[in-house]
Image (spheres, rainbow, N blue to C red):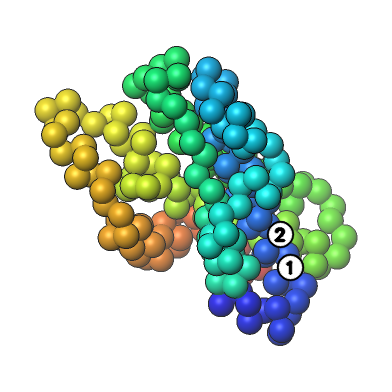
Amino acid sequence: MLINALFTDPISYLMMAVSLLFALTVHEYAHAQAADWQGDHTARAMGRLTLNPLAHLDAVGALFIFTMGFGWGKPVPFNLYALRNKKWGPSLVAIAGPLSNFLMAVVVGMILRFGHLGGERLLAFFAMFVWLNVLLGVFNLIPVPPLDGSHLALALWPWKWEKHRVLFMQGGFMAIFVAIIFMMYIGGPYIAQPLFSLITGLPMGF
């Protein structure tokens, strides 16, 4: 658990907590911005079109972030009927979150790869930031509800299976459990780790 690091290695604890907080904040802001660009100003009216972490934190999710090392932000609401594109609009709102994580990973990863960073701690912080953003991006693109990838899956959903749409969206806890298992055995080692090395030029556990 992350909370253990607070007492054994407080600097590492702070680096991970800050990285997670910033990654989740930008992730939720990206959802809000994507909806706003498409004509739905629901998030703007609710004060979610901001990079202030307090606007995006979920109380329980934040508790998990600072104790367990993973968590979630407050979902960004959007009005389907206010979006200009009713079919693909929700998918664009959804994938904006993970895409923002990949963008942050690439920008910071390029600094790691080509910059001349002084200090082991700064290098470790940047590497952790890239790794956490890659993980969040990959995890959220898994096409199971309520993850962002499920909205893209619904946009591609065959019309002949329309009657099964409601059942799909009620995946709930079991779907998240399957997604976590997928990340542990496939998503993490075979997708996230190669992406991390590709972006930073560093091996895992450098």
Q: Could you tell me if residue 113 is visible in this image? A: no
Q: Position of residue 40 (x, y in %)?
A: 51, 22
Q: Could you tell me if residue 206 is visible in this image? A: yes
Q: Position of residue 71 (x, y in %)?
A: 53, 60
Which residue is the site of mark 2?
18
Which residue appears at 53% of the width and 17% of the height? 39
- Using the image, tell me which numbered label, if any, was put on residue 14: 1
> Is there CB contact under 8 Å for labels 2 and 1?
yes
Q: Dot 2: few (<14), some (14–19), or many (≥20) neighbours within 10 Å?
A: some
Q: Dot 1: few (<14), some (14–19), or many (≥20) neighbours within 10 Å?
A: some
Extreme right residue here?
Answer: 118
Which residue appears at 45% of the width and 19% of the height? 82
Dot 1 falls on a residue whose secondary structure is: helix
Q: Does 108 sit above or below residue 34?
A: below
Q: Position of residue 91 (x, y in %)?
A: 41, 30
Out of 39 and 22, give the one closest to the viewer. 39
- Residue 176 lies left or right of residue 191; in this view the side is left
- Using the image, tell me which numbered label, if any, was put on residue 6: none
- Circle 2: residue type: Val
Which residue appears at 57% of the width and 59% of the height? 59
Extreme bottom residue here?
Answer: 8
